[in-house]
Image (cartoon, grey):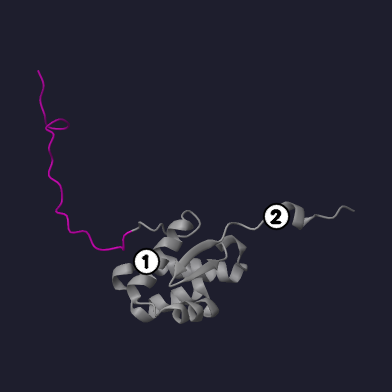
């Protein structure tokens, strides 16, 4: 009977962490792929549901706590108080770093209803046009 070696299949090398600075401190966040699968799924679900224009401060903070973890949030605020604009910039940078691994890309706009008027036909070719 052969034994499947999951260690060999996955490899021991961790992915590059997301590194950022705030105040005089440097922070490392584990790569999304290096997190436990339940955290990965929770983060991806939260990002998929994110609507930048309609997300409340409490919802944004909850997403950031998922991404950063409570310990990092505490260290971040201890280094220097963090305004909402800085948290939003951090989330966008983190999303851009993980582009392709999340449900949305960093550049994805929030969904909204179309405001465009229906287009008008511009071609006279097709049915009803007579040619001699």
* Residue numbers of the magenta segment: 109-132
Q: What element carries label 2?
A: helix
Q: Nearer the viewer, residue 65 or 1?
A: 65
Question: What residue is shown with label 2?
Answer: 10
Q: In which quarter of the image is residue 23?
A: bottom left
Question: What residue is shown with label 1?
Answer: 89
Q: Where is residue 39 in the image (x, y as percent from the top left)?
A: 57, 71
Q: Quadrant of residue 48?
A: bottom left
Q: Where is residue 1 in the image (x, y as percent from the top left)?
A: 90, 53
| Left or right of 68 on screen, residue 5 | right
Q: Nearer the viewer, residue 23 or 42?
A: 23
Q: Which of marks 1 and 2 is in front?
A: 1
Q: Which of 15 and 37 is in front in this view?
A: 15
Q: Which of 123 and 94 is in front in this view?
A: 94
Q: Is residue 126 above or below residue 112?
A: above
Q: Is residue 62 above or below residue 99?
A: below
Q: Which residue lies furthest to the right in this view?
A: 1
| Left or right of 47 on screen, residue 15 | right
Earlier in the chain: of badge 1 and badge 2, it is 2
Q: In this view, does 9 lie above or below 67?
A: above
- The alpha-carbon separation of the residues under discs 1 and 2 comes to 32 Å
What residue do we see at 40% from left, 69% from top? 49
Q: What element carries label 1?
A: helix
What residue do we see at 26% from left, 63% from top? 112
Q: Position of residue 34 (x, y in %)?
A: 61, 63
Q: Position of residue 14 (x, y in %)?
A: 64, 58
């Amino acid at each position: 009977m052969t034994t499947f070696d999951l260690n060999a299949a996955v490899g021991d090398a961790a992915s590059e962490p997301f590194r950022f600075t705030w105040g005089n401190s440097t922070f490392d966040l584990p790569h999304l792929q290096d997190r436990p699968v339940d955290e990965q799924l929770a983060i991806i679900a939260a990002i998929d549901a994110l609507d930048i224009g309609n997300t409340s401060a409490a919802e944004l903070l909850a997403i950031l706590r998922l991404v950063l973890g409570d310990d990092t949030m505490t260290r971040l605020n201890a280094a220097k108080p963090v305004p909402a604009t800085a948290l939003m910039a951090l989330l966008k940078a983190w999303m851009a770093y993980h582009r392709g691994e999340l449900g949305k890309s960093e550049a994805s706009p929030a969904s909204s209803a179309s405001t465009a008027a229906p287009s008008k036909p511009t071609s006279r070719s097709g049915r009803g046009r007579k040619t001699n």
